Amino acid sequence: MMQVVTALTLALVNIIIYFLFGCVLCASKKRELSLTRTVFVGFFFYYLLFTLCCIPIMLRWRPLYVLARLWAAVALAVCILGAARGIRLCKPAIGKAASFIRSHIAAFAGMACIVAVFAAIVLISYQFTLDASFYVGDVTTALQTDTVRMYDAFTGDWQDHYDMRYFFATFPMNDAVMCSLFRIHPLLWCKITISLTAILLTFMVLYMIGRQLYGASAGRICLFMLFAAVADFFMITIYTTAAFLTTRNYEGKCLLANVVLPGILYIYIRLLEDVKDMRTWLLLLLTALGSPVLSSTSNMLVPAMIGVTIVPLAFIKKDVAVLPKAVLCMLPGVTLTVIYILYVKNIIVFYTFPR
Amino acid sequence: MQSLHIADAGFGYIFKCIGLYYEGNIYFALYLASLILLSVDLSRVTGAERAGRWKALLSADGMTERMRRIFLPQFVMMILTVYNPVFPVILNSFFDVNKEYYRFLWMAPVIICISAAAVRIVTEYAADKTSSRIRHIRQAFCAAFIICLLMAGGTWLYADGYIVSPNIYHMPTEIPEIAEIIHEDALKNDPADEYPRAMFEYDYNMLIRQYDAGIMLACDREAYLNAVTGALDYDTIMEDADYYNRLLAVVALGIEIPEDAFTEGLEETGTEYVVVSTANGILPYIRKCGLTVAGETANHTILRYELPDYEPFELPDYSEVWRLSPQPYDFLMHSKI
């Protein structure tokens, strides 16, 4: 029981870490701090920084524990910096949020119930999914062998080169690092901590979109989340975003489908209000940079989502300057796709040993 | 989508893809209806006599105009690209997107759009100028009706039954027992055998390494899927290559191939252990092939094969590269459930 409590608590720790990471970029005396947007920013900043630490470790064939120690140091430093930058701004932001919640207590109680019931139903259930053999297997394999992606997660056999399909999608390696830092079994981490984190982030993005759609009308936001939660239990085939949220929520693809893509819609709504807001454009760029870490599918979907969502903005706002910015935000995904194609064509190979 | 190929379906691919994606539910239809509902101010349409019906349809209040701007442009772009029958065909000529194309459908904010439309129905159309109490009752009924529609129009995630996880690890309880039996037996026979290789039935083959990566597997997921989906024929099984196919034939498909062919498969893949359900009819055949029982759990039998000239698997030595302690990380990988 204690292990479950630890695993659940670690999901909240994750959110706090994202928040502190977000504070580094969001904290500014000129602007009010938005708690949810700071977590959203921090989430992408966290994974972007992690992959920047992870890839050199892989290219130099260093063991997992080196990555774990390096990441512990980096994350701690960023969290301290985030706390230092955000501490003054946090107080009024939390005060404002608390006051808003107090004035709409019934609606927020409703939202809390929706998220809690949703999470409880999903986390208590047993699901057999094929892809867990890779995504969870990858974490246990890294921990077992103390290496980073050198072994086939399915069979355990040593690989002479890294599979480029997953090379930049280092999300499971972050799981492995966190398992080793917090001394928690990968199954607990993936199927409780990350699952809950994914659910919380999904509802957080829904809330952010709700705020954009309905402003301060918390009752409408609550209703919006209720309908979304019900739909998530019923729009089920093995392919849907809802199926990923309810059965495969420890995979990066779940976060891509339920956090990143709706997140881009959220950014689009903000850009509709103010297309020249550089902070929102930077948020889109950060999303584009951070999302390939979650899943290699991001390399394809994020540029496509930016294309279908942001490009029409140029016509709506009659502003051609939108297009180069949108293209810039597509570049990370497109670049990684090109690298993958070069790998498939045997032009780029990263070996798991010195040659 | 394993069963759907762009080359076969051609321009009809996208329709089949959407059909499979939303199979058994009406959510795509609800999405389209929601787009219309959010883009049109129905209150103006009903009073359209004065303004002219089409003009009324296109005119909008602030909220409708905003919703229209949020959801419609993306949908139009999706129609031009992702939902365009030509697009997957062109894309597939550059990249193999047969299995992954359905992920483009994630871009449509189906649930968000439906939820927004539902909120609009409840808060705008179900609310009239009657007294507050009657209005709230109307709204509650309306919300309940929409929830019923969402439920009836879809497939309940737990339609086949809600299974409570048997433990905190979300694993069958026999998995750790089997892992322990295999490790104990392997180390008893050879103290250096830290990474024994085993072959399991379908679901356990997918589960075991999630719990214990110290057990290696004879074949990976794709090979297993090929076998269970009927892509493995007898000639392929008996080929002197990909010897894991012989293990798949016996364990996954229950085919009794010549005994020496099976043991050759075990030897060539370095597989010491075979784990099958005790109720599996292939068990007597496996025992006849020379495997001995290493242990049993409530529903599974663990059999061991004495591999001739067996050399235990060792992790490649990176000590020179690492220049640091190459000792495996001290981690609680084998904690008991």
Image (tube, rainbow, N blue to C red):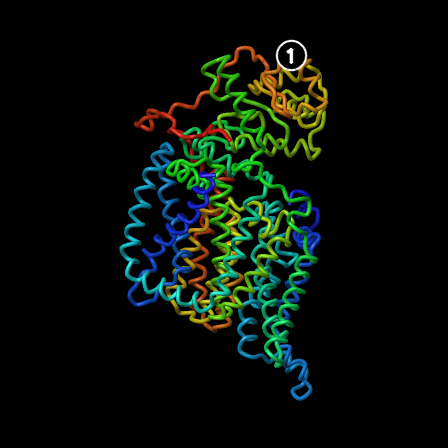
The one nearer the camera, B177 or A277, is: B177
Q: Picture coordinates of residue A169 (x, y %)?
A: 46, 44
* In the rendered image, the vertical position of residue B129 relative to residue A350, given as above or below: below
Residue located at (68% from left, 50% from top) = B20
- Relative side of B159 to A115, left or right: right
Residue located at (62% from left, 19% from top) = B265
- Relative side of A314 to B48, left or right: left
Q: Picture coordinates of residue B277 (x, y %)?
A: 66, 25
Q: Quadrant of the C terminus of chain A?
A: top left
Q: Classify residue A285 by image quadrant.
A: bottom left
Instruction: Residue at the far top: name it.
Output: B308
Q: Classify residue B304 by image quadrant.
A: top right
Q: Picture coordinates of residue A252 (x, y %)?
A: 50, 46
The amino acid type of the residue labelled 1 equals Gly
Callout count: 1
State the residue position of label 1: B290
